[in-house]
Image (cartoon, rainbow, N blue to C red):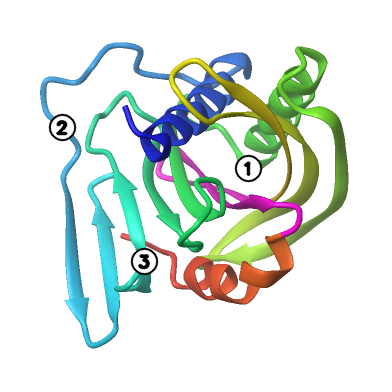
């Protein structure tokens, strides 16, 4: 497994922790016999990733992505904004929710999961920098900016601690919770923020 796949696996593990620690959120713990469809369409300098999980997101065609059609995997796409970092990027995670679950429930679920990860030592020195309500992709949403220290897998046997900063947007649509994240090394966050914001702003529900 190469370094990029290793860090992607780590991100998936972190998001799976979010998925299973929140009350009221239902997750599919076994692979679905029917994979979630996904496609990519390039027009000019941009590529649009379309997921059967109910969203589209557009990014510069020169960027590298990892994507998954596995119904049990929360991370559907990870778009790398840096050619040299396996962390800096925008990703979209989706979660099956119990019928009738509201955005306020999903916010509480995610906040509790982040705090649980911090208590468990995954996010060391975890700190919330900012929170705000907003409209995103035409839906009420909640944005949070936080920082912490996470383990980064640099090889099959070696892990190092890395300081990261993240912006996450949480929204709910059709009994699905969406987590749209920009995650980067602390030193890279401001550098790639404009491009990450442009990618995130292209997110649409389908």
**Picture coordinates of residue 57, whole percent (x, y):** 37, 64
Q: Nearer the viewer, residue 196 or 98?
A: 196
| Disc nearer the start of the sequence (3/2) | 2
**Picture coordinates of residue 99, whole percent (x, y):** 45, 28
Residue corresponding to mark 2: 35
Q: Residue at x 55, y 74 (%)?
A: 195
Residue corresponding to mark 1: 103
Is label 2 in a helix, a strand or a loop? Answer: loop
Q: Is residue 181 above or below residue 121?
A: below
Classified by dominant secondary structure, the portion drawn in magenta counts as strand
Q: Residue at x 49, y 15 (%)?
A: 157
For the residues bearing labels 3 and 2, Cβ distance under 8 angstroms:
no
Q: CA distance from mark 1 to mark 3?
A: 32 Å
| Disc nearer the start of the sequence (1/3) | 3
Is label 3 in a helix, a strand or a loop? Answer: loop
**Picture coordinates of residue 4, whole percent (x, y):** 40, 40
Magenta region: 169-187
Residue corresponding to mark 3: 63
Is label 1 in a helix, a strand or a loop? Answer: helix
Eye-nearest disc, 3 or 2: 3
Left or right: 49 as drawn, with respect to 158? left
Q: Is residue 103 above or below residue 32?
A: below
């Amino acid at each position: 497994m190469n370094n990029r796949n290793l860090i992607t696996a780590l991100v998936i593990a972190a998001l799976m922790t979010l998925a299973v620690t929140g009350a009221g959120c239902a997750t599919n713990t076994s692979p679905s016999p029917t994979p979630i469809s996904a496609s990519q369409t390039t027009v000019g300098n941009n590529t649009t990733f379309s997921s059967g999980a109910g969203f589209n997101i557009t990014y510069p065609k020169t960027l590298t992505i990892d994507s998954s059609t596995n119904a049990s995997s929360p991370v559907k796409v990870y778009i790398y904004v840096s050619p040299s970092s396996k962390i800096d990027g925008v990703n979209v995670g989706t979660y099956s929710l119990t019928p009738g679950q509201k955005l306020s429930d999903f916010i509480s679920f995610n906040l509790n999961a982040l705090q649980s990860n911090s208590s468990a030592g995954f996010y060391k020195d975890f700190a919330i920098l900012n929170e705000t309500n907003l409209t995103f992709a035409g839906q009420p949403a909640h944005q949070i900016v936080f920082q912490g220290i996470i383990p980064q897998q640099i090889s099959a046997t070696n892990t190092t601690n890395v300081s990261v900063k993240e912006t996450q947007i949480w929204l709910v649509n059709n009994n699905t919770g969406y987590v749209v994240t920009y995650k980067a090394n602390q030193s890279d966050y401001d550098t790639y923020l404009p491009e990450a914001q442009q990618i995130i702003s292209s997110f649409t529900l389908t």
